[in-house]
Image (tube, helix red, strand yellow):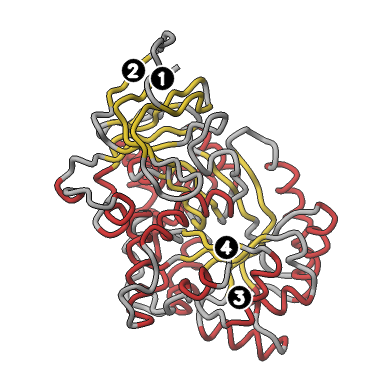
Amino acid sequence: MIRFYNANIMTMAEDCAVQRGELWTDGDQISYIGETPAELPAFEREIDVRGNLLMPSFKNAHTHSAMTFLRSFAEDVPLQTWLFEKVFPYEDRLTAEDVYAFDRLANLEYIASGTTAFFDMYFYPDSTVQAAIECGLRGVLCGSINGSAKDVERLNDQFQKFRKIHPRIGYRLGFHAEYTSDESLHRGVAELAHAEKQPVYTHISETKTEHEECIARHGATPAQYFESIGLWEYGGGGFHGVWFDEADRAVYRRNGLWMVSCPASNAKLASGIAPLKEALSEGVNVALGTDGAASINALDMFREMYLGAVLQKLRHMDAAAIPAAAMLRAATVGSARAMGLHDCDILAEGKQADLIEIDLHAPNLQPTHHIPESLVLNGDRSNVMLTMCAGKILYENGEYFIGVTPEEILADTASRIDRLTG
């Protein structure tokens, strides 16, 4: 058992209220949250939090983790050019061993910035699973097929293989996007979703071009088209949703879908600003993700929260457009639920011990008038002092506890990057 005491605790069970007390973990679960009792059991370790904040860890609800190898490689070009000229040709050179190495690099970044789970869509999923298990993280894989109906069998094979491979690994049905696959694939995925009673996820309405070309092909926006073929019957969601209109958001609300926004990526690639204010006010489920490091450069949920909040102010020319706390919940509770991680969405007794400690004494977080707003608007990754996943401390005071040193990981990736992009 581990005891955290003298803590400010934000459970996020209902809102972002903060309580003073302590939190205990037993194995991979939270066993106690409350005031200090008169009698204490024996603990393996006791940590004086010194008034710092304990809160649910971040869950990154949209990633392509191994794209760390293209970080800062393809800059200042629009998405279609970036994707078809600067990304796809170099991804064709990847091996399973490369993906494992670049996933480990991403995992260092996740852990140090307080992220314990990621929703990953990429090649060589065995490599992603291996890297996540070894580093102590949670990984939810998302199907990444494209093409035609013949590829649906591969999606089913992966679903059956990875859905129960490890307690910290999950799998969700999915495909890359409407514009990289044909109708036979879409209908095939819908049939598989019905057979397995599973949600489906995909990139959706990320750019205006993508959105309008789908209308030209199918006479409907991607969200409405997918609803018409029964893709959403068991839920799911989409990544980006920048060009959603009111009818698209109604599709999401009707089907209980998750709108996973990636504000920084959409801003950098000039894709647009997603209608998050409208989505939240209309009751649409909202989560946050970073996208891959090739498009966003930093796998940093603090930056996503900040931009998610302030870009809505700019979009609506309204400084009160969206509460900062809404972005904090989207990056933690919302993202966990979008990924199906209902056992580690909040801090509560019996939930998984996935939490972080935030240094409230850091200059950028002083004074702490309003903690949720401070985290979103002036917090950054340097404020993360400790990251715990499934009851295991993976990072504390700048040191990793993942069975391998950062230097080893960096040495492994350096030669691979030279080979792939040289």
Tag on residue 46?
A: 2
How many residues crowd mark 2 within 10 Å: few (<14), some (14–19), many (20+)? few
Tell which of 9 and 128 is nearer to you: 9
Asked if residue 220 shows in the view, the reply is yes
Q: Earlier in the sequence, mark 4 or mark 2?
A: 2
The answer to whether marks 4 and 3 mark residues whose Cβ atoms lie closer than 8 Å is no
Q: Which residue is mark 1?
A: 2
Which amino acid lies under the numbered mark 3 shown in the image of this protein?
Arg
**Kind of residue at badge 2:** Glu
Indicate left or right for 155 with 141 as reference. right
Which numbered marker is on residue 249? 3
Three-letter code, disc 1: Ile
Which of 204/157 is in front? 204
- Expressed as whole percent of the image width and height from the top left, the position of residue 127 reads 55, 42
Q: Secondary structure at mark 1?
A: strand
Q: Do the residues under discs 2 and 1 have CB atoms within 8 angstroms?
A: yes
Residues under labels 2 and 1: Cα distance? 6 Å
Which residue is rendered at x = 45% and y = 54% of the image? 329
Q: Residue at x 53, y 86 (%)?
A: 209
Q: Position of residue 52 (x, y in %)?
A: 27, 36
Mark 1 / mark 4, whichever is N-terminal: 1
Q: Quadrant of the C terminus?
A: bottom left
Residue 168 position, x and y percent, is 58, 36
Give SS at disc 4: strand
